[in-house]
Image: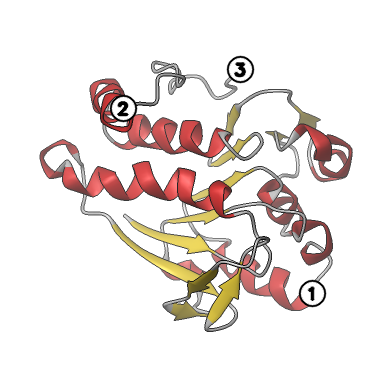
Amino acid sequence: MKIAFIVFEKMTTLDFVGFFEPMTRLSLYKNRLREELQWDLCGIQEEVKDDRGMTIKVNKIRPDLSEYDMIFVPGGYATRTLRKDVNFISWLQTAKDSAMKVSVCTGALLLGAAGWLQGKRATSNPSAYDLLTPYCKEVAASRIVKDGNVITGGGVAASLDVGLFLVELFSCKDTAMEMQREMDYPYYKAGNTNADYVIG
């Protein structure tokens, strides 16, 4: 499984890191994985600064995202403008054939702008529910929503829950629970991956 972590100017880093930590940690559980994990930090420039000024280096600049099995899009206030950036959204749309699209917080607005939430349920940071509404069939006041091959997460700290949800999906409930203990994060409720519509 090859993952593209999408990064952009003025994103919220906790949205990104909260998901990145459990997903990349999963590579340490080789005997519990169906396939090897690989990943890249992908963006449209060599480095980005988050919404507090932290600099993140990009190791793949404007790659064809169809090379990836999954893309992950974090959020941040910048998404409100970026969703209207034709250049960025057309690059994001190169992931149309990727098997899975995942977002946290207002990253859902970018999935929506790319056209991937049409006819689907989705969630985001509660402050952006009204902005998300035009892009999807239903906005769910949930921590995680899985609708087919699209998974969206709520605001900021929900990134850890979404990461653990994917760990459980790609491995098993026991792996997710073991990882929770390692990270001292007791809030994720394992055992929901069979449902397409997750309330929590």
Which type of secondary structure does the marked residue at label 3 adopt? Answer: loop
For label 3, the residue is: 199
Residue 86 marker: 1
Q: Residue 148: tell me if it is visible.
A: no
Which type of secondary structure does the marked residue at label 1 adopt? Answer: helix
Relative to 159, is 83 above or below? below
Q: Quadrant of residue 70?
A: bottom left
Residue drawn at (42%, 50%) of the image? 20
Relative to 9, is 198 above or below? above
For label 2, the residue is: 176
Q: How is the image coloured?
A: secondary structure
Indicate which disc, 3 or 2, sits on the residue closer to the N terminus.
2
- In the foreground, 115 or 81: 81
**Mark 2 belongs to which amino acid?**
Ala
| Real-space CA distance between mark 2 and mark 1, rounded to the nearest whole angstrom | 37 Å
Q: Residue 164: tell me if it is visible.
A: yes
